[in-house]
Image (tube, helix red, strand yellow):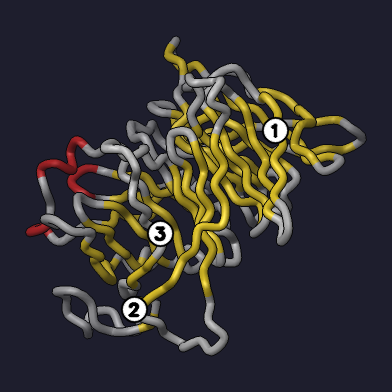
Amino acid sequence: MSSSTDTDGENPNSHPESLRYRKVQTHGLQQPSPSNSRPLLRALAFSPDGHYIAGTFDRKVVVWGLNVPAETQEERALEEWEQKLVYRLDDRVQDEALTCLVWTSSDFLLLGSSTGDVRVITIGKNATRMKGFQATRSPIRFLSLDQAGFFLAVVAGDREVSVWYFEEGEYSSYLFAFPSLTVDGQPGCVTFLGWNQATGGMLIVAYLGHGVFRFCITIKCKLITMASVFSTNVLHRYSGALSPNGNLFAIPGARGTFVIWDLNTKDKVTVLHEPAEEVSAGHSRQNDRPSQFVHDGEFLFGAGIGKLNLWNASRNIRAQRLNLGGQA
């Protein structure tokens, strides 16, 4: 990634000092499959230091490591990745699949499964260890760690939310489960889970059709307190993104837009638009388009059909379009 003032198909003078991402060719991440059907990639994530990539497939997790030569160039046209670890589920349990992953550090990986198990993989220089515990009996959909690494939040099924505490080297110390949210007799389905990284013990949970809630979790004298505050208007989307300071929440809107809300004032801050000529009718059916705040929350990546849009969220300007192949 480098800073630049020109963008794809846009006036370079309209937003000076914007970011620009360039495509980096990689080698070693794609391995030939021995069978005709390739396994489904469930999740993909960089380690915090950027030296590893972990990918969960139906019944295995693969960790690749970045090979850095002794003499490195500041900008390389090709990155070499090498397979470091492959962990497969027990063949005796055929109905289990891996569903999600999260790095806690560059040598500590958490995996969620369809049977409700959480597996912890420790990647060492000489050996790799795996432990785990059963967090629920329902399929795990989301895992999220607070910045300090003490609290692990788990979403299982549609609406089961529980919190675990890291104690004596494990996350097996159960704290509590959130009560099921019901508004006008309708149960809430969890669509987003994330910690406010600027405030310890603040968990943000979004419920389909009900809104966004903040739960304040503290431990004092072995007592746990929890408070919730309704944060935005009714949501009818299946994904969301939280800014690093925990104040802004972005959701996909109609016709390729992303709507940003202020969780403190409960006001709509802005609506990020694509150029009119790029809006596709297919966007009206894409209620789960992912997004992510980057660069301290000043910019937002938002997925479109065959592309990624990078907006300067603070100025409501699209800085760049990244084509992913096919018709964008």
User: In the image, what residue type sits under mark 1?
Assistant: Gly
- Mark 3 lies on residue: 29
Work out whether mark 2 precedes mark 3 in sequence or the reverse, and give the earlier one: 2
* Residue positioned 66% across, 51% down in the render: 104
Residue 132 image label: 1
User: In the image, what residue type sits under mark 2?
Assistant: Ser
- Mark 2 lies on residue: 18
Work out whether mark 1 precedes mark 3 in sequence or the reverse, and give the earlier one: 3
* Quarter containing the C terminus: bottom left
Asked if marks 2 and 3 touch (Cβ < 8 Å), the reply is no
* Residue positioned 63% across, 48% down in the render: 109
Residue 277 position in % (x across, y down): 7, 59
Residue 257 position in % (x across, y down): 25, 50
State the image quarter where residue 278 is shown. Answer: bottom left
Along the line of sight, the residue nearer the viewer: 25 or 144: 25
Q: Is residue 27 above or below residue 59?
A: below
For the residues marked 1 and 2, what is the alpha-carbon distance in whole angstroms?
A: 44 Å
Judging from the image, what secondary structure is the residue with disc 3 in?
Answer: loop
State the image quarter where residue 42 is shown. Answer: top left
* Residue positioned 72% across, 36% down in the render: 131
* Residue positioned 40% across, 35% down in the render: 233
Mark 3 is surrounded, within 10 Å at the Cα level, by few (under 14), some (14 to 19) or many (20 or more) other residues, namely some
* Quarter containing the N terminus: bottom left
For the residues marked 2 and 3, what is the alpha-carbon distance in whole angstroms?
A: 30 Å
